[in-house]
């Protein structure tokens, strides 16, 4: 069953360039992952420092494999350090 992953982050203006580079690294890696369907990044209008990524996967197993992927974990750790908080994930069935 298809799943959508909502990835929520708070972005400080000072970190936007570094964050953008890290997110591009993740996007490149994600494109080659089994079960990856699509992704989009949305910036919240009423709270400018908040953004959300909606990632669509063929199955929860595909997502879990990607979530544990060594390179993803490394880059995500760098993102969390840059932002000063852990990224929040929510998983939904379609």
Image (cartoon, rainbow, N blue to C red):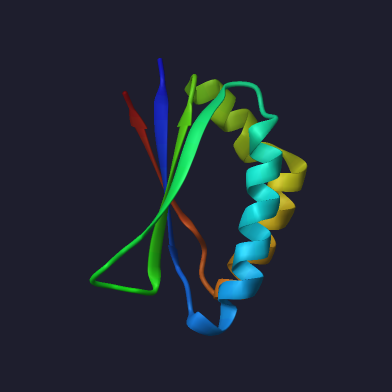
Quarter of the image containing the C terminus? top left
| Residue at the extreme bottom of the image, as rendered | 14
Total tally of numbered discs in the picture: 0
- The residue that appears at 74% across and 54% down in the rendered structure is 74
Reply above or below: 20 against 64: below
Q: Is residue 75 left or right of residue 93?
A: right
Closest to the observer: 93 or 48?
A: 48
| Residue at the extreme left of the image, as rendered | 46
Where residue 83 appears, as percent x and y from the top left, is 55, 73
Q: Is residue 13 left or right of residue 28?
A: left
Quarter of the image containing the N terminus? top left
- The residue that appears at 76% across and 43% down in the rendered structure is 70
Where residue 79 appears, as percent x and y from the top left, is 62, 64
Q: Is residue 23 left or right of residue 49?
A: right
Where residue 16 appears, as percent x and y from the top left, is 56, 74
Question: Image quarter for residue 34?
Answer: top right
Reply above or below: 48 against 41: below
Closest to the observer: 31 or 72?
A: 31
| Residue at the extreme top of the image, as rendered | 1
- The residue that appears at 49% across and 20% down in the rendered structure is 59
Where residue 25 appears, as percent x and y from the top left, is 70, 52
- The residue that appears at 63% across and 45% down in the rendered structure is 27
């Amino acid at each position: 069953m298809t799943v959508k992953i909502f990835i929520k982050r708070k972005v400080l203006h000072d970190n936007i360039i570094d964050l953008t580079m890290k997110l591009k690294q993740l996007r490149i890696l994600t494109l080659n992952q089994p079960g990856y369907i699509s992704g989009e990044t949305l910036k919240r209008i009423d709270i400018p420092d908040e953004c959300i990524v909606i990632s669509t996967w063929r199955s929860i197993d595909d997502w879990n494999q990607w979530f544990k992927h060594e390179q993803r974990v490394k880059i995500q750790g760098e993102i969390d350090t840059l932002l000063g908080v852990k990224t929040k994930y929510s998983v939904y069935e379609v």
